[in-house]
Image: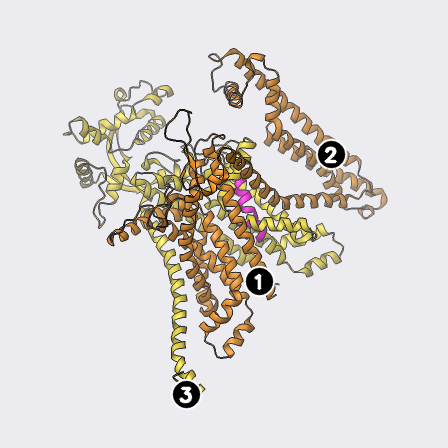
């Protein structure tokens, strides 16, 4: 049976289990004098049976879905004649691809090796038996669970506590998804990175100044030995992020100050959401804007001054990225400025300071930790931003600090290395994961520090 | 000091002008910063709209077409095999030849045949299949023009002069000739809303990408909303104060700030390489976007739960409700508007996201409109990215138009969230 159909059947079964157990509990309560003589409400008896019906069987189903392919393939390998046994990893994959193609009918069975055809047939039959076995096991487990839930119904049964315990368990496991996600990210980038560092020494990756991730496909190939020095990428990333921050920090900060301290409520009600529109625009739109409007404009202006400007200049990407980050900084700064107690403002104004003096000498120092935290968060955003740089920054890994020149960034390289067909044993693709690891660690540290700073500061005035 | 013989009052008086000037400057900088931000918003929107609004129109050319059986090379209209092989573009060629009789030479003829898009053949085919009586008949039809003609015709009245591009002078002459006899006109670009991607700009549409986005978002909301709400309920109502809870909270806050491309790497390594989920399908996209939007949804749901006053909980507990009943019967219904708002904003974020989807292969060139969760598809932002990379000038217009559609969806979702919040928000 198809997985979706099976799930629907399970759903129907649990609804049936719910009503049966609920009805039984009501029936048992009747001679006692009504449902108030039950330990729990009939609803909980019903839910208990439904949970017994659905939960174990769904767990079994998930386990099967996770491991069916590996079980079937090992069975298939076990049943192969000696001559066909694959000897290497690559051969193994090739073998499975061709068997798969014959089994699904994509490759004609008439022209293929008869041994392969036999393997394909046994694959198909294994799959069929596997599927029907799994269906039978899941359904019988569901029926057994429902029956168990039904049999156990009695006025003394503490159904509510049991149901609530399961509910709490489900809630907890949902909360743990966050931990598993972090773990998954770490493991996935870490393992591939370790494989990468086996091929390329970590020191070369971290301190090398030449990046050209081309690997020789054949061993006798000339001219593409591949070098993986990531310094130009780091410098490019920092350059673009720096330009972005130069735009975003003053503008964001000043607009937050103006909105919090000077603007009338009407002005604030209009300008704040209008600025936040910038935060809601997808990054791919900024990328398009940077590549097709800002970059040509900068090039023409630069040429007007007699400057050599690349058409994929770091300046264009950085400027547009800065615009993207403005609302991020302004709303964070707005929060912290508003959190500064009014008494500090009143005290300063009462001593005769002008508003700007109050802001510069009292509010800004008081809000500084929060602002620093916000800027750090924004910096981690700029470093991890992808689409703007993919569309507007270049691919050439140049080691330069000239904002009019073309540079490339970590995220651009991850995208170019991984988009399209890849083989997972080449350092070229693995390099993307090493870059991902660097990106993850750097942004993690920035975020962690920023959140710490912000949190510590918030407690100060609460 | 030079003015030490002045009294305090005088000293302050003399410094006041300077201080007021500084005050004025400071205020001006603030206003300028806001003006800059607003200017960027206006600039961005006018740039996109001015580049893209023309893509909603499409140039059509009127021709007299004869469904000549011998040109088509078919004998029986009802034979689908023959229809597939029939030379409908040949019919268009004949029609063009009879419209411009005096064209000779191979190159000129090829130029001439290029006036009409290759897609016009499919229009003719569909008409013939729908109405077999048309065979060997003649009818006058508006056919989709080639993208070069389209770009040229659209820019003919612009101040900067017509955009010529690859157009030969001869072709311009033909278009002008057609225009004089009112055989060229702009019509609503229906292809743009009904077709999938195409290499020919005049045939490319966003329907495929929009459907892909829809399927991806359905998966995302179906997974992230229940999980996010459950996690928020646990953390706000049940979690004990211990290290494990702290760990969960730190993780959620950090994940909210992890670059989206990292989630793409996760999807590639775990879902595709480890679990062997097929590439380019909405299911994987939805899973990756779920993990990405979960922190947003959890954080906003927690805020919504926090906003429910404790007195409600106390009252429910007082009349004998169990903690679970308090949450399910009282806290959740009251917090629902806030949670929904958070979910819509999370979905808007997911709709605009591109980078992680590039990693999991949703960047393929897909012509067919996906019909389900496991059909290869792409999504709107990725389609924008792909078109932005295309060299044809006509794609620039399409890209802007696709951006307008995407922004329209986003504005709609955000407005919905705002309205929902205004309507259902309760002050305690």
Near-viewer residue (B214 or A36): B214
- Quadrant location of the N terminus of chain A in the rendered image: top right
Determine which residue is flagged by label 1. Answer: A457
- Few, some or many C-alpha atoms within 10 Å of disc 2 (few <14, some 14-19, many ≥20)? many
Camera-side residue: A154 or B31? B31
C-alpha span from label 1 to label 3: 43 Å
The foreground one among A310 and B387 is: A310
x 29%, y 41%: residue: B393
Query: Is B296 inside the magenta-drawn segment?
Result: yes
Splitting the image into 4 quarters, where does residue A411 fall? top left
Task: Describe the element under mark 2 as helix, strand or loop.
Answer: helix
Q: CA distance from mark 3 to mark 2?
A: 96 Å
Q: Which chain is yellow?
A: B
Evaluate if marks 3 and 2 touch, with contact meaning CB atoms under 8 Å apart.
no
Q: Which residue is mark 3?
A: B6
User: Which corner quadrant of the image does residue A58 belong to?
Assistant: top right
Q: Residues within 10 Å of mark 1 (few under 14, many from 20)?
A: many
Q: Which mark is residue A146?
A: 2
Tell me which segment is drawn in magenta. Answer: B287-299
Which of discs 1 and 3 lies nearer the camera? The answer is 3
- A278 shown above or below A134: below
Left or right: B266 as drawn, with respect to B400: right
Protein chain holding label 1: A
């Amino acid at each position: 049976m198809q997985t979706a159909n099976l799930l629907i059947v399970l759903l129907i079964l649990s609804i049936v289990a719910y009503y049966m157990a609920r009805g039984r509990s009501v029936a048992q309560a009747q001679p006692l004098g009504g449902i108030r003589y039950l330990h729990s409400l009939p609803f909980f008896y019903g839910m208990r049976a439904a949970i017994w019906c659905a939960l174990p069987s769904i767990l079994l189903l998930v386990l099967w879905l996770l491991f069916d392919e590996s079980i079937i393939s090992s069975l298939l390998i076990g049943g192969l004649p000696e001559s066909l046994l694959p000897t290497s990893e690559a051969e193994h994959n090739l073998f499975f691809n061709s068997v798969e193609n014959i089994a699904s009918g994509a490759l004609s069975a008439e022209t293929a090796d008869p041994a392969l055809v036999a393997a394909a047939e046994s694959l198909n039959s294994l799959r069929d038996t596997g599927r029907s076995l799994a269906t039978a096991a899941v359904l019988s487990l569901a029926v057994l669970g429902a029956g168990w839930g039904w049999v156990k119904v009695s006025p003394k049964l503490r159904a509510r506590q049991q149901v609530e315990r399961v509910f709490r368990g489900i809630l907890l496991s949902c909360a743990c998804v966050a931990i598993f996600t972090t773990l998954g990210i770490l493991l996935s980038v870490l393992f591939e990175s370790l494989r990468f560092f086996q091929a390329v020494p970590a020191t070369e990756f971290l301190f090398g100044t030449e990046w050209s991730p081309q690997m020789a496909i054949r061993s006798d190939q000339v001219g593409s030995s591949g070098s993986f020095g990531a310094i130009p990428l780091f410098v490019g990333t920092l350059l673009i992020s720096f330009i972005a921050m130069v735009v975003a920090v003053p503008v964001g900060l000043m607009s937050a100050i103006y909105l919090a301290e000077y603007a009338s409520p009407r002005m604030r009600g209009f300008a704040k959401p209008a600025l936040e529109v910038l935060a809601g625009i997808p990054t791919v739109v900024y990328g398009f804007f940077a590549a097709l409007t800002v970059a040509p404009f900068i090039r023409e202006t630069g040429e007007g001054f007699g400057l050599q400007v690349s058409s994929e200049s770091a300046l264009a990407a950085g400027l547009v990225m800065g615009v993207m980050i403005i609302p991020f900084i302004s709303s964070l700064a707005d929060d912290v400025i508003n959190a500064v107690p009014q008494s500090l403002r009143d005290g300063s104004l009462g001593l005769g300071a002008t508003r700007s003096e109050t802001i510069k000498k009292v509010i800004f120092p008081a809000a500084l930790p929060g602002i620093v935290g916000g800027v750090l968060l924004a910096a981690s955003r700029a470093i991890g931003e992808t689409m703007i740089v993919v569309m507007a920054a270049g691919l050439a890994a140049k080691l330069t600090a000239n904002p009019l020149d073309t540079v490339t960034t970590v995220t651009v390289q991850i995208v170019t290395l991984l988009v399209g067909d890849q083989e997972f044993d080449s350092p070229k693709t693995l390099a993307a994961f090493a870059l991902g690891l660097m990106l993850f660690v750097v942004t993690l540290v920035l975020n962690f520090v920023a959140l710490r700073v912000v949190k510590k500061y918030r407690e100060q005035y609460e | 000091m030079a003015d030490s013989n002045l009294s305090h009052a005088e000293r302050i008086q003399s410094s006041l002008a300077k201080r007021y000037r500084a005050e004025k400057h400071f205020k001006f900088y603030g206003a300028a910063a806001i003006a800059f931000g607003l200017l960027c918003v206006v600039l961005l929107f006018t740039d996109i709209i001015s580049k893209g609004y023309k893509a909603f129109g499409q140039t059509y050319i009127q021709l007299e077409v004869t469904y000549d059986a011998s040109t088509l090379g078919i004998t029986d209209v009802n034979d689908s095999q023959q229809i597939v092989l029939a030379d409908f573009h040949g019919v268009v060629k004949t029609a063009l030849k009879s419209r411009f009789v005096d064209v000779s030479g191979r190159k000129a003829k090829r130029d001439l045949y290029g006036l009409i898009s290759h897609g016009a053949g499919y229009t003719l085919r569909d008409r013939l299949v729908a109405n077999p009586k048309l065979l060997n008949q003649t009818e006058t039809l508006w056919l989709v023009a080639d993208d070069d003609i389209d770009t040229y015709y659209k820019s003919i009245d612009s101040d900067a002069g017509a955009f010529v591009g690859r157009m030969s002078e001869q072709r311009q002459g033909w278009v002008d000739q057609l225009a004089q006899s009112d055989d060229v006109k702009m019509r609503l670009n229906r292809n743009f809303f009904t077709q999938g991607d195409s290499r020919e700009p005049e045939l490319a549409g966003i329907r495929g990408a929009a459907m892909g986005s829809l399927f991806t978002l359905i998966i995302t909301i179906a997974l992230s909303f229940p999980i996010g709400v459950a996690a928020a309920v646990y953390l706000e109502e049940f979690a004990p104060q211990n290290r494990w809870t702290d760990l969960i909270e730190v993780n959620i806050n950090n994940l909210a700030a992890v670059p989206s491309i990292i989630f793409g790497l996760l999807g590639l390594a775990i879902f595709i390489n480890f679990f062997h989920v097929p590439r380019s399908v909405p299911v994987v996209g939805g899973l990756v976007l779920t993990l990405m939007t979960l922190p947003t949804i959890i954080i906003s749901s927690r805020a919504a739960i926090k906003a429910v006053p404790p007195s409600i909980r106390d009252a429910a507990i007082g009349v004998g409700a169990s903690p679970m009943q308090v949450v399910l019967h009282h806290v959740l219904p009251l917090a629902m508007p806030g949670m929904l708002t958070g979910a819509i904003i999370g979905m808007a974020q997911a709709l605009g996201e591109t980078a992680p989807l590039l990693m999991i292969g949703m960047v393929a060139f897909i012509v067919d409109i996906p019909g389900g969760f496991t059909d290869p598809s792409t999504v709107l932002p990725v389609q924008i990215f792909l078109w932005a990379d295309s060299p044809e000038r006509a794609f620039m217009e399409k890209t802007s138009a696709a951006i307008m559609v995407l922004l329209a969806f986003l504005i709609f979702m955000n407005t919905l969230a705002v309205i929902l919040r205004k309507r259902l928000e309760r002050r305690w």
